[in-house]
Image (spheres, rainbow, N blue to C red):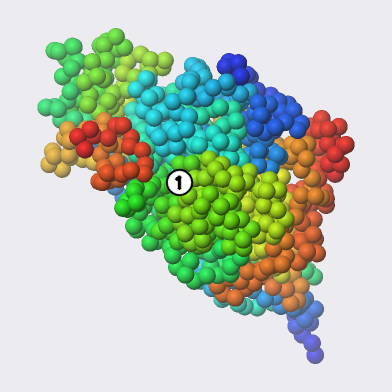
Amino acid sequence: MLRPQEGRRRREAMGKVRIEVLPALGEALGIEATGEEDISGGESPGHFSVKDLLNRLGTRYRRFDQLVFDADGQQLTGQVVIFLNGRNLELIDGLETKLRDGDTVTFIPFIEGG
Amino acid sequence: MTEIKFNLLEVDLTNETSRVVDVTEEVKKYLGGRGLANKLIWDAVPQGADPLGPDNVLHVGVGPLTGLIGTKTILSFKSPLTDWVGRSSISGYFGEEIVRAQYNAGILIKGRAKRPVYLYVYNDEVKIEDATDLWGKWKQETEVTLRDRLNSQTGEMFGVLCIGPAGENLVRYANATTEFVHSASKWGCGAVMGSKNLKAICVKGTKGPLYADHQKVWQLFRTYATSSKTALRKLSESRWGHTTSPPHLLRYAGEGIKNNHLSYNHDIVKQSNSLEHHLKYYMWTDGCPGCAASCFVPYFKNSERGAFAGEFRHDNTGGFNANIMIGYEEMAELSPLEDELGMDGEELGGIVAWAMDLYEHGIITKDDLGGIDLKWGDMEAACELMKKIAYKEGRAPAALAEGFRRAYQVFGEASKWYAFEVHGCASPTYDIRNKHYGRGLEYATSHNGARMGAGLDQQLRGAATICNFAIPPFIQIWGSADEATRVFLNAACGWDLTIEDVKEIELRDYYFNRCISLREGYHPAKDDYFPPRAFEESVTDKYGTSWVWDRAEFEEEKKKYYVNKLKLTETGLPPREGLKRLGLDFVIPVLEPLGAIG
Amino acid sequence: MAQKKKETGKDPAVPATAEAKPEGWGRENYPYPKGAAFIECDEMKCVGCGICQMACSMAHFGVINKELARIQVRKYLLPLPKAVQVTCCQCPPEERECQKACPLKKSPAIYFDKESLHMVVDEERCLGQKCLLCKKACPADAIRVYPAVAAKPFVCDLCDSENVGDRRPQCVDVCPYGALYFKGTQHGELMHDHVRKHADEKAALIAKRMYPLKRESMFNPTWRYKND
């Protein structure tokens, strides 16, 4: 017999995304250089956004949270630039961009100089 | 709370007169800096005017926040390099003197002097002084002579902005500097000054800045100055300045190596080590008024060839040393020459590398170069070329002094493939092929040239004025750049802006700036492209990642960039409704015939 | 967003960190000296931000105006930009040129108050702009004038404006570089004329780091010591 929770989980599970980060940045963020993340259990049922991913990583890894989110937890610090399948998130739908099975999310340190 | 007034000092070099104009209403719409300059240029410079002629203007812009969020002075003008709207930004205390003299909307310079002059501003005393004895002098000598002279006369330390021989000789990417290492580099502002016979601008202000509520401003500012977030920022900025980004980018195919041809090159990168440079030659940390995370790290090198003082930054070093195959040891000797002669280091990094490439491939000869054997990695040959460019001596140097587009006409079609330029401007750094670190799309869609600073999110900075490197702690403390700007503006000016108001000013300034370029002949359909090499020649970083653009992909990304990042139409034009909503409908009759309304 | 909650108060324009308390880099670990003390400038750390000047003018005059500050930061070009601070060293009695120069010989209008332990200008008795002998006498030019706002000269009083013995130098508190120290005199050796130098003189000395040899390639500033 299918337990109700199991059934719900199976209905929500939508695949995995691949996470890539430069080893040096990965250490700073406290995450592995390459990893996979299950894209289920987002804020809105039926889809998992980049924002959901960041929240999850931020909850799991304190250094990620500190580097990526500002003190109020309302905005990104901009220290880490996010790419989805090689394209800058800003050119898609920003944090609301929905993730799909097989996507690759890359974190790049923000480099500036003038 | 009373709102403050905004005073613009208008100087007419032709008639050698000046007056102070109340521009409060315009500043409310556009802020100061490049925002106000949009209006001044649109009104004062006739369409199609010669940028090196007397009809061009130069706005030395400050804004209500200059000195509070770093000190940036924004020069706005019609550019002799691109023929479009030019904007150049410079730090150092020069801009603060303008604020303290209470010309809080900046200085607008019009016309052309009949002989070499310098502008003297000491509070209300404005004079146009003879500079015949200074004309021809290199930058150090100019600045020190003026500082000493004015100090003897008044007992005060003036802020001095001056040009070198390159500006005097109208090299199209000549720069202007203050305190020798702070430079207004981009788009030929030095040539604009040179074309007006304006050798230097000297300012001293002792009245103090105009603020509506000093207590409130201080309360906000002190929060920033004593915050731990600011202290942390200092840890990265104040030791290294901006010398750590080039070595990082060199490993990730983010900077040009050998005229942007080579993939990662171990030898060059080994010789481009910031720590080695720092330990040998770093003197101290220096900064700008109001900034608690100073980022200038001047160096001094004494060798048997002489003494060399300067400052490595990303812009004057990143796209330059590796691009011409020299290391930091040689760059330490070349870099001061770039400042002394007065040319934009970013442009030179591309131009000199291009010249070396053309020489290697026989498109220019030793004769063309006036006898220079312009080999890769030869610092002295590069210095010789730079001197010749500054004085336009010789067939090739004179052509190079005009920038890529005009040089094509001299060197011919064969030279074009080697040129790594966007909009006719060198793009050696933040390699455009690199989608992670590069700024390809930013350059390709820029109506200023090929450079950061043209985008929508930069307009507020250029108008407030705000230093990009000073603002991060403000963002962390107040939550966003717009909010930090908003609270400071309200306290300093006596206004009552909302976040929406701030965003509106930003968009208005961005559209208006783009409209000036559109008026002067820029059009995204014909101009927003990459050089062929960006599609045909890939580069690989140290760790094996390769970068090159696909043409179809570029066109698609560009469209998304226009719409998502720049709030333009898919064709890169300002939308008609947006222009009307923001009070810019007066541009429509001018731009419509050019097909430049979205 | 991830667990953080907004820590700040209701008014977003005035975060909780607006309290006038230095925080974050150990400044709070330097207790204020109890006895005689002065503000020492660590010139090599100064970056020229002038925030000390802003704090000073605000504390004494209620406005931000660097000209109204008792501490001054000057920028030089050596040929590299260098900032140098200068302020009153609260000189010991034997070296106190300003007090000696005051024409009110019996009871100088500028004097060191032995109770509150800092320099004081008695504005009622001071002769003001038509005298200024104290300013001319100070080798560091630490005495300031600004006739448009202040009738009489003013000098660093360690931020004890009411002269009640409450010394809290605001410049020291706010300097982001720790380039100012509020130091007590351990054995009386620090309050001495050897640190009392004009900013021009300090700059010329720093410049000597860069001109040990004759140079051909760059221009020599004129105010180098002539006997080099």
Quarter assignment of residue C82: top left
Q: Secondary structure at mark 1?
A: helix
Q: Position of residue B318 (x, y in %)?
A: 53, 56
Chain identifier of the residue bearing label 1 in the image: B
**Residue at (48% x, 21% y) in the render:** B130
Residue at x 44%, y 65% (from the top left corner) = B271
Nearest the eye: B445 or B17: B17
The image quadrant of residue C139 is: top left
Residue at left 39%, top 40%?
A: C81
Q: Which residue is situated farthest in the front direction here? A: B367
Locate the N terminus of chain B by quadrant: top right
Amino acid residing under circle 1: Leu
- Determine the residue located farthest toward the bottom in the rendered image: A1
C223 and A111: which is toward the camera: C223
Q: Is residue C9 visible?
A: no
Q: Relative to B563, is B328 on the left or the right?
A: left
Q: Which residue is mark 1?
A: B337
User: Relative to residue B424, is residue B397 drawn left or right?
Assistant: left
Horizontal and vertical percent position of residue B58:
62, 30
Establish if B126 lies above or below C8: above
